[in-house]
Every structure is written in C-alpha cells, then in structure tokens.
Image (cartoon, rainbow, N blue to C red):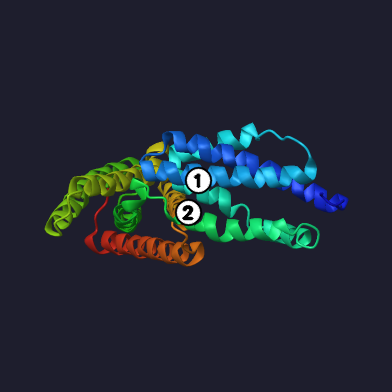
Amino acid sequence: MIKTLSSKALSIIKKMQQNEITESVIYEEIAKFAKGEENKKTLLRLAAEEKAHYEIWKKYTDTDLKPQKGKVFKYKLIARILGFTFAVKLMENGEEDAQKEYDILKDEVEESIWIRQQEEEHESALLEMLDEERLQYVGSMVLGMNDALVELTGSLAGFTFAMQNTRLIALSGLIMGISATFSMASSEFLAAKSEGRNDAFKSCCYTGVAYLITVALLIMPYLLMGNSRYMTALFTMIAVVVLIIAGFTYYISVAKGEKFRPRFLEMTLISVGVAVVSFFVGVLAKYFLGVEL
C-alpha cells in the first residue's frame, strides 16, 4: 500500500516521472541512429532503466504521463549534429540540481534513495561505455584548431597593422591558411603512419577540417567589412577566437568530463597573447622597413 504523501513530495515525484519517461524515449530514439551495436545496446539499457524508474514513480502518482516532445526533438537534433555522447551527457548533466529534490523525498519515499544511487553509479558507468568515433579523434581536432587559432590569429593581427586593408589581409590570411591546412593535415598523416596506426588518413582529415573551418571563421570579419575598417575586423576576429575556444572547450568538457574553466583560460590567453605580440611586430616591421601599402 502506498502511503499518503505531502503535496510537495507528490509534485517532485510527478516532475521526476515526467523526466524519466522523456529521457527513456530520448535514449530509444538516439539508439536508432547511433553507430555501433554496443552503443545501441548501452543506450537501450539506459532507456529501460529510465522506464523502470518511471513505473516506480507511477505507483505514487497513479497517473500516466507522456514524454515531452520538445525535449525529445531537442536532444535528437543535438545528437545528430554534435554526437550522441555529447547529447546524452549534456542531458544527464542537467540533472545535477535534482540532488536537493531527492533529499526532500528520502524521508517519505524510501525507493528514491535506490533510484538516486542507481542513477549516480550504474547510469554513469553505462555512459562511460559509449564509444563514439568522433570523440576518438578529438585530439586531432584539438591539434588542428589550436594550431590554426595560434598561428592565424597572430598572423592576421600582424597583417592588420602592416597592411591596413581588409581585402589584402583576408587574401594573405587565406593563402597562408589553406597552405597551412595541407601542411598540418599531411604532418598528422605522416605522424600517424610512423606510429603504425591504420587510421592515419581519417586522423589527418579531422585535423585538416578543424584547421580549415577555423581559418574560414577567422578570415570572415575581414571579408565582410570595408577596406578601411581593419581595426574593427581585428577586434571582431579576436571575439570570434574567444567564441570558438569557448564553444569547443564546452563541447570537450561535456563529452569527455573535463573541467571547462582551466582549459578555456589557457587557450584564450595563448591565442590572444600571440595576437597582441604579433600586432606590435606588424607595427615595428612597417616602421623599420618603411613599407607603405
């Protein structure tokens, strides 16, 4: 027999019941297109556990609830674009505030202790079993992106004062960026080959694509602004650098469980620091060489 619960406890249980059925459906939907049989099995096990938790909460509410279609669509879209590992870990990270609610429930619902323990231990262990290809090549992507950020940010900053013309700066940056993309990708290919890896080509593709995308984003401000607005383009480019670092660092921190702040500050300080130094190198080079463009 289910004992009578307080209105606060019942409200919390209904909220958790809603979350459990929604997340169960999300896991099932993502499992349909996730690559790898083991990944599919893991996602379906997670879905089954969420459904079991839903059934437990249902005993207390005596109510059938439907999954939240908006939330299901949101995480399916995230999984398609950014990968299923990122999507499910992002979803689970959003439940960290539930600890206070479980603390409220434990005095009235003993099963809440077991459910919370299973979610913290078993589900966390299952999430760590997910093996997504794109995350295997995060190192290659970081290598390409970091090199592009440091090298191109510095070069564009130096070009900005030396040339003082957005079209010339963009042209120089584009030529250098494309050349550096092929150089970086080929270096990664040769390094992987020398290590005896069978995925050398795929690794170099991830590195090259990350580098090329970064190049395009950094040059974009110079292409979109008028010839005389080179300083505005410079500051916009630096803002883009910070946004790229923040976005990629956030992705890694969620998908691989790493801390966001230290990595973000380190990469930002290096990239912006190189840009500042390179800008003054451009100033000095133009002054001492007496070049006018």
- Residue placed most toward the observer, 292 or 129: 129
Identified at 28% across, 46% down, the residue is 206
Q: Could you say where residue 30 lies in the image, as x and y percent from the top left?
A: 48, 37
The reply to whether residue 250 is visible in this rendering is no
Residue 282: x %, y % from top left: 30, 59
Q: Secondary structure at mark 1?
A: helix
- Which percent across, then down, holds residue 94? 61, 52
Dividing the picture into quadrants, the one containing residue 101 is: bottom right
Residue 77 lies, with reference to residue 152, above or below; the image says above
Mark earlier in primary sequence (1, 2): 1
Question: Which of the labelled discs sits on residue 201, or is there none?
Answer: none
Left or right: residue 143 compared with residue 190: right
Task: Name the residue beneath numbered marker 1.
Answer: 45
Identified by mark 2, the residue type is Leu
Q: Which residue is mark 2?
A: 126
For the image shown, how many numbered marks are present on the structure? 2
Q: Which quadrant would residue 190 be assigned to in this image?
A: bottom left
Tell whether 77 sits left or right of 147: right
Observer-nearest residue: 280 or 105?
A: 105
Residue at the spot x=24%, y=49% of the render? 203
- Tell me, yes or no, whether the two marked residues, 1 and 2, touch with CB atoms within 8 Å: yes
163 or 92, nearer to the observer: 92
Which element is circle 2 on? helix
Asked whether residue 273 appears in the rendered view, the answer is yes
Q: Quadrant of residue 97?
A: bottom right
172 vs 197: above or below: above
Residue placed at 20% from the left, 54% from the top? 188
